[in-house]
Amino acid sequence: MAQITQSGPIPVRALIAEAQRELDLRRQFYWTRVRAGKMRQDEAERRIALMEAIVKRLTVTAAL
C-alpha cells in the first residue's frame, strides 16, 4: 500500500480531491436511484453524509 503524506506518492490534497469527486458523483447518482425507486432517500443521505465526513476529516487532518 502506498504511503500517505503531504507530498509523498499519494499527497493528501490528491486524496481530498478524489473524495470530493466521489461525493459529487454520489449526489448525482443516488438522486437518480432514489427517483427511480431503487434506493431509499434515507440510505442515500446516509451514504452522502459518510463521504462528506471523509472529505472533512481529510481536510482537517491535513490542516488545509
Image (spheres, rainbow, N blue to C red):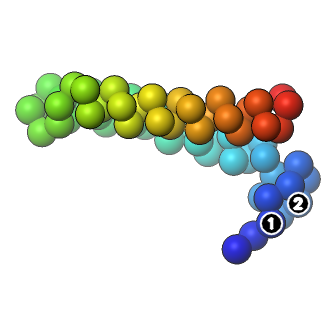
Q: Nearer the viewer, residue 32 or 39?
A: 39
The answer to whether residue 14 of the structure is visible from this angle is yes
Residue 38: x and y in percent read 12, 39
Q: Which residue is mark 1?
A: 3
> Outermost residue toward the left?
37
Q: Quadrant of the N terminus?
A: bottom right
Frontmost of labels 1 and 2 is: 1
Quarter of the image for residue 32 reads top left
Q: Are marks 1 and 2 in contact (CB under 8 Å)?
A: yes
Residue found at x 56% / y 32%: 53
Residue 48: x and y in percent read 41, 31
Q: Check disc 1: other Cα within 10 Å, few if <14, some if 14-19, many if 20+.
A: few
> Outermost residue toward the right?
7
Quarter of the image for residue 2 reads bottom right
Q: Quadrant of the C terminus?
A: top right
Relative to 5, residue 53 above or below: above
CA–CA distance in space, label 1 to label 2:
7 Å
Residue found at x 61% / y 45%: 18
| Side of 51 where 46 appears, left or right | left
| Side of 41 where 2 appears, left or right | right
Q: Which residue is mark 2?
A: 8
| Side of 25 where 55 appears, left or right | right
